[in-house]
Amino acid sequence: MSDEKEKELEQSAEPKSEEAAPAEAAPAEATPAAAEATPKPAAESAPSAPAAPAVDPEREAKLKAAAEARAARAAAKAAAEAGGEAPAAAAPAGAGGEVDPEKAAKIAAAAEARAARAAAKAAAEGGEAAPAEPKPPSPKQPQLDEAAALIRASVAEDAIEEAYINELNDHMPTLVIRADRLVEACRLLKTRTGQDYTYLRNVSGVDYETHLEVVYHLVSLNSKNELAVKVKTNREQPGIPSVVPVWETANWNEREIYDLLGIDFPGHPDLRRIMMPDDWVGHPLRKDYVPLDPEV
Amino acid sequence: MIRTEELLLNVGPQHPSTHGVFRIIVKLDGEVITEATPVMGYLHRGTEKLAEDLNYTQIIPYTDRMDYVSAMTTNYVLCHGVEKMMGLEVPERAEFMRLIVMELQRIASHLVWWGTYLLDIGAMSPFLFAFRDREIIINLFNELCGARLTYNYMRVGGVKWDAPVGWIDKVREFIPYMESKLDEYHRLVSGNEIFLARIRGVGAYDAQTAIDYGLSGANLRSTGVDWDLRKAKPYSIYNRFEFDVPLGKNGDCYDRYLIRLEEIRQSLRILKQAVEQFPSSGDVMGKVPRVIRPPAGELYVGIESPRGEIGVHIVSKGKAEPYRLKFRRPSFVNLQILPKLLVGETMTNLITILGGIDIVVGEVDC
């Protein structure tokens, strides 16, 4: 387990213990399985996992069962409260009757959330315990392969520097294309059936300090498939061919990137600053940007 | 023969019908525009640069000030992006609150557009009606978060404040009221001959052009392209509700007008279902780590704002501040088609076409 995970645990430690309190107070008549695994041991076992990577599957199952049992008990209790207490409380004040079902529902919801979290945790631990198991291929993998194969076959074998799935972004297929092949490749992606990326959603420029990068987010209005195309360029003489001939919408987007990051777009019909004044010095979104006049 | 000379005319940056500090330089031959050059940046505040030194919660108020007519949707897109990156769960009640405020916001935004658009064209009273009705929504938001325009309402993992007692009932009462007023709007304006003469067939383009220019929202749908991100790429809990996406076919200002008014009706439809299904209890804030640190990586996500696709591209290095934050602003992208539409049009149509695109300059300049 990584440091990050530990940090996360630290951060979320307080809210967790708050939550755990009602659950711990309730189970006096706990079953043996549940008693063995109250929420606390489950949380504490996490940091110790690196020492003993092989987590006992039996224990896992028990943990899961315990979490389920706890949730069920809490739900039952909530139901009992709602059913049994509401009529009693109705006597002193009308308001009491209104509050109780709400409270009961809240408890039930909390129990459900707790159970879900415990299950998720058990699942996560299970995943880490068995690293040998290969990751299932992304559902978007065929889409990426198809686009990459098309460009390799029709543009150039070396047109693609990298092709990967960005899992963080709903498994977004991502292609890193060489700058000098960009326009050709984009034209193919737009016009070829099966690709059909007619709509350019967004163009972003990013300064990675070692290099600059432009990202094109494409979507097909028919198949609803998404694709990200990236192009890298150096920081000293940055230049990426303009894709305005392919998608008209790149026009102002490229002007904005030129203005704020200083990337040249040869082939652009009207490359001028768009946000900053025409006589501005420097490109503000560069990481090493220093204003010419610090007073401004 | 009358000799005409080319005239260079400067419109803006301070011009009432540009709804902000936006400038356009037009070349005129008589009354006909031969060339138009938009000049932007008067409201550029460098939000994207500022965001690189702020943590995610601190950026939310900045998003209020981008599309200040529809701050709730801009709030949402940032929170939604971060939640997706971190894989956070948003409680049910918070999702409902978000959906309700976003749809109310869509109505409020379209009302502002409707009122000011007609004001630009020369009708004064619709403006007063629109702002009278919008005031109800603004008051609802005021009750919710104490602000009338820059709400700063959403947070990563939920919303900041729960609905006060009776708030949902006020929303429920608003729905039939607004429906009746919408019919009134149609009776008052939509069939008016002077109005029709001003906007029918003006600023028309076809679907292919709209897609090439990356237009979104009513600007795209007026050409008949069925692309609403609430349906095409469902986010939040929109897939639980029934609503239609109104489409045009001529791609002119009149179609855009009708679509926006119909979108108010569809938003009311969503709201009606949402207030019925609104969970009676539950948290409005999910379990979120104290310091919000999305994992290293990047993500782009877009949602449907009243003006079109508003998107956020987050590049994270695993720190509390974004490494790079780029907003895809629908007003900025939609405005690109303006110079093309204006060539060959008269000066009076400049106002009609610009108004029809529906821009917010705070969002154009970011």
Image: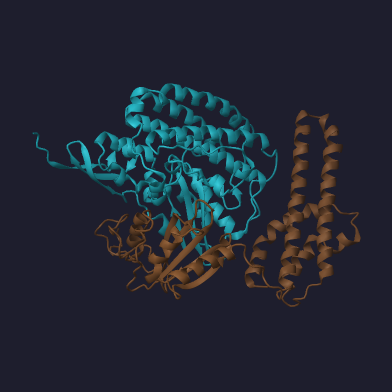
Identify the residue at image location x=46%, y=43%.
B217
Asked whether residue A5 is in view, the answer is yes
Q: Relative to residue A281, is residue A246 drawn left or right?
A: right
Please state the horizontal and vertical placement of residue B336, each as a whole percent of the image. 34, 49
**In which image quadrant can residue A144 be found?**
bottom right
Chain A shade? brown
Please state the horizontal and vertical placement of residue B67, each as a whole percent of the image. 43, 45
Identify the residue at image location x=45%, y=21%.
B187
Identify the residue at image location x=82%, y=47%.
A75
Please state the horizontal and vertical placement of residue B37, each as a whole percent of the image. 26, 48
Asked whether residue B322 is in view, the answer is no
**Frontmost residue, A75 versus A157:** A157
Chain B shade? cyan
Question: Which quadrant is the C terminus of chain A positioned in?
Answer: bottom left
Note whether A189 is above or below A233 in the view shown: above
Q: Relative to residue B162, is residue B347 drawn left or right?
A: left
Q: Relative to residue B90, is residue B105 drawn left or right?
A: left
